[in-house]
Image (cartoon, rainbow, N blue to C red):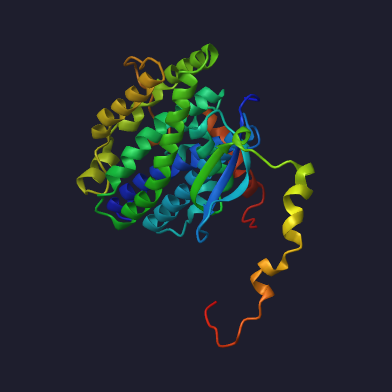
Amino acid sequence: MSDWPLWEVFIRSQHGLAHKHVGSLHAPDAEMAIRNARDVYTRRNEGTSIWVVRSSEITASEPDQKDALFESPKGKIYRHPTFYPVPDEVKHL
Amino acid sequence: MSQNGAQFFEYVLRLGDNDLILSQRLAEWCGHGPVLEEDLAQTNVALDLLGQAQLWLEYAGKIEDKGRDADQLAFLRDTHDFRNLLLVEQENSDYAHTIARQFYFDAWHFLLLQALQSSSDQGVREISEKSLKEVRYHLDRSSGWVIRLGDGIEESHARMERAIHALWLFTGEMFEMDAVDIEMKERQIGCDLRALRDPWLNQVSKTLEEATLKVPADCWMQRGGKRGIHSERLGYILAEMQFLQRAYPGAQW
């Protein structure tokens, strides 16, 4: 059982719209991964839907590319909506 | 308690004791599961069954009307007062035995609870309905394991085959109709257990076939649990389960 692959688990919660990464687990195949996810990660009524993805199928950004990837937006605070004052008359924004 | 009530009490007690003893057996795996994921999964099933046991025993206590609640029924009865099937008190042994026991029970439990949905008694209907949702998952899970282990490697196949055959003689009791069952069926509180035998065998055969396992041949069937005649194994289960209330009567947490 030590050769069971690792799976990443994503759960959509009761109110949330998007599936959120909650952790990982071992399982021999996708069907068992879903079952195990149900038993490991939804014991406290957390979920309405489960996704599982083989961890090896995930492509991640390289930590040493951090500057190249994330430096540019750092100086562009005007991209945040809070940068602009909102007139009081504007409702429901 | 009237004669009517006594039979009804007995009937509900049986339903509760099956869940309670199997739950206690499964709980023995807690912390010892083959992998962490399976350890949690098995304990979840144990907790489902414990919850169901609590509902049935609480209800039994009400029917009996002598002031006994679920805890008192669980912790202060001796072996001969327990009414569970012999199947559920069998030892965990290896994982194949645990799974085979669960699979035989789940397949029957599912059909039973389905039949009890049309009980004339509201309490029985409600508890069955709530339990059925959980048991559907239990059956799905244990069937899945029977197939995986049976149709797995040579050793898992051999172990599953052994377990399936070793426990077969405890399956007959599930379909036995004694005086209590007959009366409950006549009053439409209970169901015809004999009628569950064919659909059970169909389900079991289908799964065993998929698992490349042979369906055991008809044989002599062990019985007695429903009447309180148990193997010595139940004594050990109770000794552990009831220890706290026996040593410290009335202890609460």
Coordinates of residue B84 in the picture (x, y in percent) = 43, 37
For the C terminus of chain A, give its image quadrant.
bottom right
In the image shown, does A74 or B11 lie closer to the viewer? A74
Q: Residue at x 52, y 79 (%)?
A: A92
Residue B62 picture quarter:
bottom left
Coordinates of residue B137 in the picture (x, y in percent) = 43, 40
Judge left or right: residue A78 versus residue B74: right
In the image shown, does A7 or B213 lie closer to the viewer? A7
Judge left or right: residue B232 versus residue B203: right
Q: Is residue B192 above or below residue A84?
A: above
Q: Furthest residue to the left?
A: B186
Q: Residue at x 29, y 41 (%)?
A: B180
Q: Residue at x 26, y 45 (%)?
A: B184
Judge left or right: residue A67 versus residue B16: right
Coordinates of residue B66 in the picture (x, y in percent) = 43, 58
Residue A65 picture quarter:
top right
For the N terminus of chain A, give its image quadrant.
top right
Residue B225 visible from this viewpoint: no
Q: How many marks?
A: 0
Residue A29 visible from this viewpoint: yes
In the image shown, does B26 or B4 lie closer to the viewer? B26
In the image shown, does B129 or A10 lie closer to the viewer? A10
Q: Is residue A79 above or below residue B117?
A: below
